[in-house]
Amino acid sequence: MVTLNRIYTRTGDKGTTALANGERRSKADLRVETYGTVDETNACIGLARLHAEPRIDAMLAAIQNDLFDLGADLATPEGPEPPAYEPLRIVAAQVKRLEADIDALNADLAPLKSFVLPGGTPAAAALHLARTVCRRAERLAVELSAIEAERISPEALQYLNRLSDFLFVASRAANANGAQDVLWVPGKNR
């Protein structure tokens, strides 16, 4: 367990932060930007939970914990030598749990006949916001993974991809299983 007795350390006052392995990086570094955007996703999910019904709230609670695992994973670069400790990594079982949750929520949804605009109920709108921030985290993770010296696990990428899918399906579930979805009408305002 992590113990935080002191919140400010002054070690970041010059624009750097420490990765889990102790390496200092710029706060504008792509790896830091990636796990920072995962943290933003988590904050958006926290907001969505204020409006979520119990079934979705329980799923979101598990996801919030997973996102801290993902942040730890991304903050611990894979190097040529294994670290002296077992780093926390996203595992396939976490991806599978997301898939099972998607399938459970999707089973009650009517098929889509148009794209869905972000909105509807407060829960759905907050879940759509979380989805878009998650997609940004995913884009950053893909960019990071393309750098040979910045390897990340395939499960981390899979988790982000499934999470954005989950958030979309959960937003529809929060919109009375799609009955309150706000649908895109192409060219409506021409």
Image (spheres, rainbow, N blue to C red):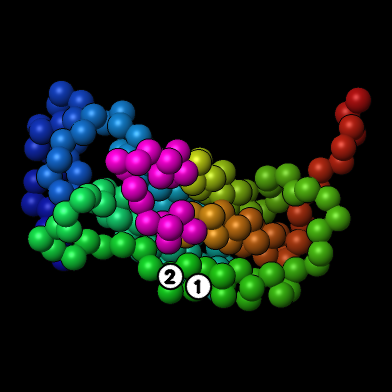
Does residue 6 appear in this view? yes
The amino acid type, in three-letter code, at marker 1 is Lys
Bounds of the magenta span?
Answer: 141-158
**Residue at (75, 68) in percent of width and height:** 109
Please name whichever residue, 24 or 43, is drawn nearer the observer in this view of the structure. Answer: 24
Q: Which residue is mark 1?
A: 96
Mark identifier at residue 59? none
Label 2: state its secondary structure: helix
Please name whichever residue, 10 or 88, is drawn nearer the observer in this view of the structure. Answer: 88
Please state, as top left, top right, bottom left or bottom right, where the C terminus lies in the image. top right
Please state, as top left, top right, bottom left or bottom right, where the N terminus lies in the image. bottom left
Q: Is residue 72 magenta?
A: no
* Real-space Cα separation, disc 1 to disc 2, in angstroms: 6 Å
Counting from the top left corner in percent of width and height, residue 121 is at 67, 54
**Residue at (16, 36) in percent of width and height:** 24
Q: Which residue is mark 2?
A: 92
